[in-house]
Amino acid sequence: MLNFIPEIPVADWINTAVEKMKNTFEFIFDPIKDDFGEFVETTAEWLSQVPALIVILIVALIAFFVSGKKFGLVTFSIIGLWFVYNQGLWEELMYTFTLVLFASIISIIIGIPAGIWMSKSKWAQAIITPILDFMQTMPAFVYLIPAVVFFGIGMVPGIFASVVFATPPVVRFTNLGIRQVSNELVEAADAFGTTGSQKLFKVELPMARKTIMAGVNQTVMLALSMVVIASMIGAPGLGDKVLTALQRSQEGPGFVAGFGIVILAIIIDRVSQNLNKG
Amino acid sequence: MSVISVKNLSKIFGKKTKEALSLLDEGYKKEEILEKTGCTVGVNRATFEVEEGEVFVIMGLSGSGKSTLVRLLNRLIDPTEGDVEVSGENLARVGKETLRKVRREKMSMVFQKFGLFPFRTVLENTEFGLEIQGINKEERAEKAKEALELVGLGSFIHQYPDQLSGGMQQRVGLARALANDPEVLLMDEAFSALDPLIRKDMQDELLDLQQKMKKTIIFITHDLDEALRIGDRIALMKDGSIVQIGTPEEILVNPANDYVERFVEDVDRSKVLTASHIMKRPETVDIEKHGPRVALERIREQGLSSIYVVDRSRQLKGYVTADDVKQARDNGEKGLHSILRTDMPTVGLEAPIHEIFEIIHDAPVPVAVVEDGKMKGIIVRGAVIAALANGNGVTEDA
C-alpha cells in the first residue's frame, strides 16, 4: 500500500551532485588541498619542533595573565602539558592543536559575518536557521564522505569536516548577541545619525561581544570534539591514537590519548572563557 | 520663528494603514479601529509648532502616543502620513543622507533609561555624536568636556556609566546630547526613571541650563507637575490625539475637556501658584524723598506695624518699624537711614507658595517680592493660607 511510488533515488542524486561539485570546483578544491594542506602540515611540524618546555612556559604565562594572576589554571596547564609530554604524545598534541586552531579560525571567519547578516535580515535568518539545524544534527561522520571526495585524506578534509560541524554556534550566538542589544541603545545610535556600519562597529558588536565570545568558545570546543572523528580520514594527532587503540582494543593507550584531549580542551576552554571576562 | 512645525502627523501601526486612516477621517475611535482593522493608532493628526528657545512639553498617560510622537520628530519611527518640518527641512520626506545630517547636527535625543553605552567611559559616551560626525579626537574631547562641565560632571570623565548614580547617568545623557550643539533637544521621559528628589534637582538644573543655552526643547512626560514646572507650553495627549495646547496657566485655569480637568485636579496647587499670583501692591516710602513723618503717616493710614523702604527706581532698601519711626520723629531726625532694617524676607516672582509658606511663618514683616532688586509686591500670611486652603489665590491683577 505504501509502495505506490517506487524508491526515490535520493542517494543517487546526492552522489551525482557531489561528483558534479567535485568536478566544477576542482580549481578551488585542488589548491586548497595542496597549498593550504602544506601550510597546515608545516605549521604543525614547526609547532612540534619547538621545545616542549618553551611551549609549556608560554601557555603558563598566558594562563597566568588571562586568569587574573591566579595560579589554579597555571598549575593545571603545567602539570597537564607535562603529563602529555611524559606519555610521549607531544607531537600528537601539537597536530591536534593545529587542527583545532585552523578549524576554529575558519569557522569564526565564516560564522561571525553570517551571524551579522542573519541579525540584520529576516530573510537571511529564515534561510540560515534550517541550514544550521541541519549542520548540527546530521551525524558528523557523514561529512567525512564528501570531505574525502573533495580533499582526499589528511588534515585538510579533517579541518573541512570540523568547520562544518563547529560553525553553527558562533553564527547563532552572533545573531543572538546583536538582536539582544537593547532597543534604547539602537535608538540612541540612530538618533545621533549613525550609518549602518557605524552602528554595527561602535554599538552592536561591542554590546554583543560577550555573547559572541561565548559562541566562539562553543565553536572551539566542537572543533576539538571532532578530532577523533577526523582521524578516521587520516588526520594525525591524539584522535588518531584513540582510533588506533579502539581498533586494537587497547584500553590503556586509548584512555591516555583521551586524557590528552581532555587536558587540551580544559586549557583552551578556561583561557577563552577568561578572555571573555576581561 | 518656529523651529519645528508639525502638520497632520499620523502613525498607524499595523498592515491596513490606509483603511485605518480613512476610518479615522470618519471619526471612529481608537478601539473601534483596532477591532475593525487590527491596526493601532499611535498618533492621530498631530499639528503644532514649536518656537525657537521654547520648552514644549508633550504630556499624556502611557499609551497616549507621546513617545511615538517624539520618535516621529526625528523619524526613529516612520510616519504614516503628515509633515515634520525642522528648520525648513521636511523630515517626513527627506532621503536617508539628509535625515542623517539633521540627526547629527540639528537634533539630539535624551532617553528615559539614559541609553548610555556601558563599554564607553563618560567622556567617550559624551563624544559619541561628534565621533559619528567624524570630528577629530582633540576637538571632540574638548567639546565633550565642555558639555560635561556644563552638567557638573567635569571630574567624572573617566568613569563608566555603571559607576554613576541614576541622576549622574542622565547628566551624561544630557551632556551627550548637548555636545553636538543641536538646535533641538528631544527629551523622552528623561527624568522619569529618577527618584523624586533627584528629579526635582534635574528639572531645576535643566531650567538653569536653558537660561544659558536657549535651546528648543521638546520634553515628553507623564507627570503634570513636571510639565507645569518646566514647560513654556504644554500639549496634552490622549489616545494619540493632542487634546489641548497651552501655557501652564491656560491648562490649569481653562482645562479644554474632562480629560484635561481630571489631570489638573491631581495637581498640588501649592506647587503651581507662585508669589506673583498672591502678592499685592506694596505701600512704600522713598528713602530719598521721605522722612519719618511721611512714613508714620502711611503706617497709620494702612494700619500697619512697619513699612518697606525703596529708592527712586524702586530698588528695595529695607523696612522701618512704627516704633522706630516714632522715636526718630521725636529725636528730630530728617532721614530714615539710621533706623533702616534689612532683615526682611524676600522671594522671587516665581517662588512657589509652599516655599513662601515656610518663610512667612517666622517673618516679622510681610514677605517682599523682588525682581532684580526691584520691589514688586508684598505677601501677607493670610493670602498664603487662603491660597493653600482653596486654590482661590489666583488674582488677575497680580
Image (tube, coloured by chain):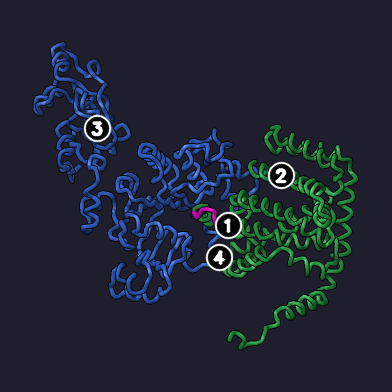
Chain colours: A green, B blue
Label 1–label 3 contact, CB within 8 A: no
Residues beneath discs 3 and 2 located on the same chain = no
Q: Which mark is residue B96?
A: 4
Looking at the picture, tell me which residue is in the foreground, B131 or B158: B158
- Label 2 vs 1, first from the N-terminus: 1
Quadrant placement of the C terminus of chain A = top right
Residue corresponding to mark 2: A266
Label 4 or label 1, whichever lies nearer to me, is: 1
Rendered image: mark on residue A176 = 1
Question: For mark 4, does the 10 Å Cα neighbourhood hold few (<14), some (14 to 19), or many (20 or more) residues?
Answer: few
Q: Nearer the viewer, mark 3 or mark 4?
A: 4
Disc 2 chain ID: A
Q: Position of residue B323 (x, y in %)?
A: 14, 16
- Marks 4 & 2, CB-CB < 8 Å contact: no
Q: Is residue B313 visible?
A: no
Q: What amino acid type should be assigned to the residue bearing mark 2? A: Ile
Determine the CA span between mark 3 and mark 2. 71 Å
**Residue under disc 4 on the same chain as residue under disc 2:** no
**Of all residues shown, which one is farthest toward the front?**
A249
Q: What residue does disc 3 label?
A: B356
Q: CA distance from mark 4 to mark 2?
A: 49 Å
Percent coordinates x, y for residue A103 in the rendering: 76, 57
- Furthest-bottom residue in view? A4
* Drawn side of residue B277 relative to residue B207, left or right: left
Mark 3: secondary structure: helix
- Give me the C-alpha separation between circle 3 and circle 4: 53 Å
Name the amino acid, label 1: Leu
Query: What's drawn in magenta, residue-wise?
Result: A177-183
The amino acid type of the residue labelled 3 equals: Ile
Residue at image coords 80%, 53% = A242
